[in-house]
Every structure is written in C-alpha cells, then in structure tokens.
Image (cartoon, helix red, strand yellow):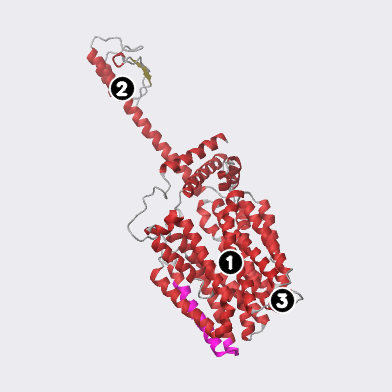
C-alpha cells in the first residue's frame, strides 16, 4: 500500500462533523473514490451537486475505514494472543537461579527427613530402651506406633497453621516441636513420659509431612515442580539409613538409647536455622496481599543473566497463575460431594483400598522392628544394626530407581506396583519359611535376605507409587480431599501393623506372623492387578456413573477465575 495525504471527508448527511484519517488504501481504491466524489486537491470535497454520489462516496469511505479498523483489531488481537503465549512460555524458558531454588527446596524437604530419621532411630533404640525402662511388649508397641497416630493430628493442625501463619512459621514450629520432643524422649524415666513426648514428636512429623510438599510445590517453577516435590519422599528415605547409621555408632555406650533419641534434635536444629534464613512462600504472600514481597521472592528464582524485562514477565505470569490457583482452591468439592457423587465412587474404592493395602503386608514390622526381630530370632545385635543400615540404603536406591522410570510410558505406575508387590510376597514368604524352621545359620541368612528384598520391593513399588496413583485417580475438584483421605487411611494401616506386630509374634511366632503378612500381600497384589489403573500420559481421574459434574459448585467458573486474575493484575499495578 502507498501512503496518501490526509483527506477530510465531510459526512453531514450522517450527522457527523468530519473524520480525519491517514489513508493507506491501495491506489485503485483511492482513485475510484475520487472519481465518484470530486475531491479538491486541498482540504476536501467542494462539489456537492450530486447528493447521491456524495452519500455513496461517504458510505464507501466508511466501509473502507471499518475494514481497516477491523484488520487493525485483528492484528492487535493476534499480537495480544502472541503476547499471552510468550508470557506463558517464559515460565518454560527462563534461566533458573539454582542456588536460591535448591537452598529453599532442600530446607523445606529437611522437614520430611525428620520423619525418616524418627522411623529409623527407634529401631536401634528399642532393645536397650525396653531393658532400661522394663517395658512390656505391649508398651513397646505403643511407644513405637504412637508417633504414627499423632502424625495424623499433626497433619490436620498443619493445614490451619500454614494457611493462617504461613509456611515458614509452620516449618519453624515443626522443627521446634520435634526438638522439644527429642529432648523430652531422651530424658524420660517412665513409660508415661516417654509415650507423651513420643506423641508430641508425632505432631511435629505430621506438620512437616504436610507443609514441606506445599512449600516445594508453591516455590518450584512449573517445569521443575514434579521432580523437586519428589525431594520430600527422597529425604524420608535419606533419613531412615542416616538414623540406622547413628544407631549403629551409638549402640553399646552407656545410656545409648537416650543419645539415639536425643540425636533427633540435630536435624531439628538445622531445620530451624535454615527456615529462618529462607523466604516465605510467594503463594502465601499473594494471599496476604503482600504483592511486593511475593514479587521479590519470585524474582530471586530468575538467574542474574536474564534481563529485567524477562524477570518482570516471569513475576507477572507466575502471580497470575497463582491467582487462578487461588480461585480453583476456593471452589473445590465439598466433603458432602466427595462422598455422595457417583463420579468419585470408583476413585474412593480404588484409592482408599490401595492406600491401606500398601501398609498391611507388613512394611512397618520391618522398618520399626528389624533389630528387635533379628536379635530375638538369634542373630547378633551388632549384625542386626548393620542389616538395618543396608535396608535403608536398599530402600533409598530402589525408590530413586522407580522415580527414574515412572514417567516412561513403557513402565508407568502399574508395572512397578505389580513387580514390587510380587517380590514383596516372595520375600515375605522366605521370611515366613525361616521363622517356621527356627534359628540356624541358613534361616538367619534367609530372614536377612527376605528383609532386604522386602524393603527394596516396597521402595520400588508400593512406597512411591501409592501417592502418585492417589493424586491421579481423583478428578481435580476432588483431588485434595482424596489425597487427604488416602493419607489418613495409609497412616491408619501403618499404625495397625506397628501396634500389633509384637502381639502377633507372641501369639503366632515369627513364622505364623510372616505367613499372615504373606496372605495379606497376595490380597494386595491381586487387588492391584484387578483394579489399580495406569494413567501414565492420560487424563487424570477415573469415574463411575454417568452423572458428570455440572461444574456449578465444584469447577471454578471462568468468570470467577478471570475476576481473580483481574484483581491480581490490578493489585500488581498498584504495587
């Protein structure tokens, strides 16, 4: 197109005083208009003798203007869409400041290490603790399993603390409570005092298990979120062999069990110091309308090599996505809908049954009581402590191996569950056979081999896959509550095993107890083969029935989401 001089077109017949524009039409269009309406080369039209031609000329011109305006609007819309796509893509392409990110993620995941450490340290402390305080097997079971039960309470408390006081305050509270609980357990001189402080420690563990993954998910960039959130599970498995090693080093000194339990204060102190030095979650800051602080935390995730424009775009897009998430969280399914909707029947059946069946085959009988079992079976206690260390390393290794394969479409989620469940049954069967024949050199090796195989199979299958499958089988509006229910059922299954193992052994012996676990393992494996789905690379959620949710009360409406995003954008401008 060629640039033309400004043309004043008088449109008196349409009630307009005039219209001025830069005409960028083609020469042919301009020439035809000049032929119809005799324009003066200067300011505009002077020959109004033919009103029809004048009106026709003005209509042509207005249509042309409308066409140009429409074309301009189309170009602007394309640019706007391109800008939005670019803003969304910026979260997948900007360079991450790894030093800041990993410092925060490791600090948060340290809260999960507290659980792993406590699970492992009690195993080496049980025998000297029982001898020193003259505890019965029933009392020993309560001391061991109480932390699991009170961790459920801690999980419920954690949600309130994290939402009202912040993730940082919640983690700091968990660290300080764990510190107090560890010192209290080490200084206990009676069963009642030891049980009380064990319950206090369980509250701290439950708080850490909830707040740590929340903080990781809210801080981690979208493209790193899955991998970094898995740090929590990995740190649990790091804490277990670390505690086994501490138990091995401290066993045999005077008051060894007290030092073992007190050693939990060291990771708690480290966690408290690191939490003080880390920032608050940007999502929590955004909820509190502290936009400048939230933007500052997000900007620290961007590497210094990026331009200021890139940093601003990352901050803006991240905060807008957080605004949408806030709206979605407000309009999740209610507990009534969770239990009454036909859409959740299959997910509840599969999820809750699978959650408890991953624990009932007896994993906690191995994690908590391995030293007690081997020593009472006839093995040397020092050897038993070394075996527990090997168990912790095997569990950590196979959990990491499963994490590498889980997103492979040829492997997925279901295959590790079935393979892990199958070898879990085989290994528990080896232990049952050894228990039925009594202690010999061969049966001692059999039971050690069975323990190592069992924790490896659990680390590859049921352990990591339980939480991933739970997250995938529920539709979005029901997912958070489904995960909460699954977690409670899973912990109750763990509590059942930990609180009944020694009683079963005294009633049935090691062979009979492990045989019961073999039967439960077969049931668990059969259920997994028949009902557990594999949603690798597929849309999340399984459902039963045809009553698809209408989305009025559960699914966040577009209007509500857009309103939240607009509010966030306005607040960002004011900030």
Q: In the rendering, at what x and y percent does residue 182 appear?
A: 69, 65
Q: In the rendering, at what x and y percent does residue 207 appear?
A: 60, 59
Is 420 in the magenta?
Answer: yes
Which label's residue is closer to the chain start, 2 or 3?
A: 2
Q: Which mark is residue 564?
A: none
Instruction: Give the quadrant of residue 384.
Output: bottom right
Left or right, 558 with reference to 510: left
Relative to the observer, which residue lies in front, 116 or 139? 139
- The residue under label 1 is 149
Would you call the spot at circle 3 few (<14 residues within 10 Å), some (14-19), or many (20 or more)?
Answer: few
- The residue under label 3 is 133
**Image position of 288 with respect to 521: above or below:** above
Element on which disc 1 rests: helix
Which label's residue is closer to the chain start, 1 or 3?
A: 3
Label 2 to label 3, Cα distance in Å?
A: 97 Å
Q: In the rendering, at what x and y percent does residue 521 appear?
A: 47, 76
Left or right, 171 with reference to 338: right
Name the residue rendered at 49%, 63% in the picture. 486
Residue range (magenta): 418-443
Element on which disc 2 rests: helix
Q: Which mark is residue 62?
A: 2
């Amino acid at each position: 197109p060629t640039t033309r001089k400004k043309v004043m077109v008088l449109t008196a017949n349409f009630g307009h005083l005039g219209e001025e524009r830069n005409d960028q039409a083609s020469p042919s269009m301009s020439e035809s208009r000049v032929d119809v309406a005799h324009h003066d080369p200067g300011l505009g039209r002077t020959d109004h003798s033919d009103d029809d031609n004048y009106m026709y000329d003005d209509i042509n011109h207005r249509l042309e203007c409308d066409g140009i305006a429409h074309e301009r609007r189309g170009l602007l819309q394309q640019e706007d869409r391109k800008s939005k796509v670019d803003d969304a893509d910026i979260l997948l392409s900007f360079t991450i400041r790894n030093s800041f990110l990993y410092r925060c993620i490791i600090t948060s995941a340290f809260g999960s290490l507290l659980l792993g450490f406590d699970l492992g340290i009690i195993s080496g402390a049980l025998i000297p603790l029982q001898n020193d305080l003259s505890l019965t097997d029933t009392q020993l079971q309560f001391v061991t399993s109480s932390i699991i039960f009170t961790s459920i309470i801690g999980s419920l408390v954690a949600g309130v603390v994290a939402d009202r006081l912040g993730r940082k305050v919640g983690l700091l509270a968990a660290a300080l409570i764990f510190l107090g609980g560890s010192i209290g357990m080490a200084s206990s001189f009676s069963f009642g005092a030891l049980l009380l402080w064990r319950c206090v420690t369980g509250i701290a563990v439950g708080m850490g298990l909830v707040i740590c993954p929340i903080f990781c998910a809210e801080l981690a960039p979208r493209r790193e979120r899955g991998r970094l959130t898995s740090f929590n599970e990995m740190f649990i498995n790091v804490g277990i062999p670390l505690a086994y090693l501490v138990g091995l080093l401290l066993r045999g000194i005077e008051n060894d069990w007290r030092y073992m339990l007190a050693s939990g204060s060291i990771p708690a102190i480290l966690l408290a110091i690191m939490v003080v030095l880390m920032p608050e979650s940007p999502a929590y800051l955004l909820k509190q309308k502290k936009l400048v602080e939230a933007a500052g935390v997000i900007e620290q995730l961007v590497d210094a090599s990026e331009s200021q424009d890139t940093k601003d775009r990352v901050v803006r897009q991240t905060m807008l996505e957080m605004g949408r998430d806030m709206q979605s969280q407000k309009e999740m399914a209610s507990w009534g809908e969770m239990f009454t909707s036909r859409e959740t029947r299959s997910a509840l059946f599969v999820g809750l049954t699978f959650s408890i069946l991953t624990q009932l085959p007896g994993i906690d009988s191995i994690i908590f009581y391995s030293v007690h079992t081997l020593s009472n079976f006839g093995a040397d206690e020092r050897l038993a402590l070394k075996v527990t260390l090997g168990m912790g390393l095997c569990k950590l290794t196979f959990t990491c191996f499963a994490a590498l394969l889980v997103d492979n479409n040829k492997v997925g989620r279901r295959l590790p569950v079935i393979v892990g469940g199958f070898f879990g049954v085989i290994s528990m069967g080896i232990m049952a056979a050894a228990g039925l024949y009594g202690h010999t050199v061969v049966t001692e090796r059999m039971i050690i081999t069975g323990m190592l195989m069992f924790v490896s199979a659990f680390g590859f299958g049921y352990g990591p896959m339980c939480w991933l499958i739970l997250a995938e089988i529920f539709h979005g509006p029901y997912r958070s509550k489904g995960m909460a229910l699954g977690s409670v059922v899973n912990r109750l299954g763990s509590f059942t095993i930990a609180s009944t193992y020694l009683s079963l052994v005294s009633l049935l012996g090691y062979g009979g107890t492990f045989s019961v676990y073999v039967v439960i393992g077969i049931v668990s494996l059969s259920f997994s083969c028949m009902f557990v789905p594999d949603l690798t690379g597929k849309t999340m959620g399984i459902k039963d029935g045809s009553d698809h949710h209408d989305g009025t009360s559960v699914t966040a409406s577009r209007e509500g989401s857009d309103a939240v995003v607009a509010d966030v954008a306005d607040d960002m401008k004011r900030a």
